[in-house]
Image (cartoon, rainbow, N blue to C red):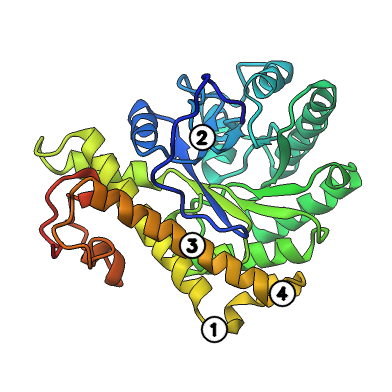
Amino acid sequence: MKSLTSSKAKTTMKGPSADNFTFFWGAAAGTDRKVLKTHQEENVIINFSTQNNNPWDGIENLFIDSGGYSRMLDGGEYRSSIKEYVDFINRYDPNYFALRDYPITKEILKKTNESVENLQKKTLEAHFETLEHYKKSKTSAKPVAVIHGKNIKDYLQMIKRMNHWGILNRIDHLGIGGLKSYSTNTLKNLIKKTRKNTPTHIKLHGFGIGVSQLIEGELYSILDSADSQDYSIRGRHLDEHQNGQINRFTAVSNAYTSKKIKLMKELKANISQNHTQYSIIDSLGENKKTRIEKTNDLIRTLNSLKQDLIEKNIYKNEQHLLCKECLYSDDRPDNLLYCPVFEHECPYSEF
């Protein structure tokens, strides 16, 4: 991403990402943006169709989504042209951007009265036009095609149609959309079949997969990247049930921090385990030395976060890496409202 100011902000809390997997945190509402900016989050996905869609300085990995889901629920069509969208991409030069699409969910099918086949066709047409404008632009952003369906068969059929249109030959990244309502087992099956039916050079991104599902199904081991805004939903839920005892920003901040630490813990544990954890990496011909480097990168990320917390004088005893409940327990209590990362008292921590 291009620097938006003359001096780039220093990142103190690095994202839960390794070379083989990156998680993007969604920023749509104003509170979400404020939380991610406050934490200097490096991996961010922004919705072009929202009012607050301008990125800020300090984002290392920027992903811009066209915002098809919200547009489909709000009338069925975009309010801007594809050229305007690509001009926006060209202006901010993100790392990735989703080709314009027409998502497919039960809600959208009912709202628009469209068929799966027709929405897929509209997506393919929009993809093709977006790629044509992209070809004439100066951006270095990587385009991400998106497949949609109401069942696994539909998704696989769209891959075939995308290949027939010649789109798969023009992209290196493929997103799987409309995943919010699927069970973890269904997601896993869909991702595996998508992987099997796409060219080996294409990397897969999961749109709207929350941290809990990523961990429950170890979906990070079969995806290259994913994104979600579930931390914001969790934060708003806490805010609405605390009768004014905790404000919206603090609630969303706590939810973001909890989910981030939980994912960092999972990625570190996965990389630190035995050789079998690297089956996907091994299938790509990666050697042992590179795997060790990846493990060390994750450990450095955790140690960097630890040092940041110590410097803020949050901990009385440096022997604790992070909050005991957040890092060392399998399940964080649902009523954990305060986290030391934000310098609020956490009743479950041992200092």
Q: Which residue is mark 1?
A: 274
**Amino acid type at mark 3:** Leu
3D distance between C-alphas at marks 3 and 1: 16 Å
Helix, strand or loop at mark 2: loop
Residue 263 showing in the rendered view: no
Dot placed on the residue nearer the N-terminal end, 2 or 1: 2
Residue 267 point in image, percent of width and height: 48, 65
Q: Which mark is residue 173?
A: none
Query: Residue at position x 73%, y 36% from top?
Result: 123
3D distance between C-alphas at marks 4 and 3: 17 Å
Helix, strand or loop at mark 3: helix
Helix, strand or loop at mark 4: loop
Residue 146 point in image, percent of width and height: 69, 44
**Amino acid type at mark 2:** Ile
Q: Which mark is residue 298?
A: 3
Dot placed on the residue nearer the N-terminal end, 4 or 1: 1
Q: Which residue is mark 2?
A: 59
Q: Which residue is mark 4?
A: 287
Q: Comparing marks 4 and 1, which lies closer to the viewer?
A: 4
Contact check, label 2 and label 4, Cβ < 8 Å: no
Q: Comparing marks 3 and 1, which lies closer to the viewer?
A: 3
3D distance between C-alphas at marks 2 and 4: 31 Å
Dot placed on the residue nearer the N-terminal end, 4 or 3: 4
Would you identify the image quadrant in which residue 40 lies? top left
Contact check, label 4 and label 3, Cβ < 8 Å: no
3D distance between C-alphas at marks 3 and 2: 19 Å
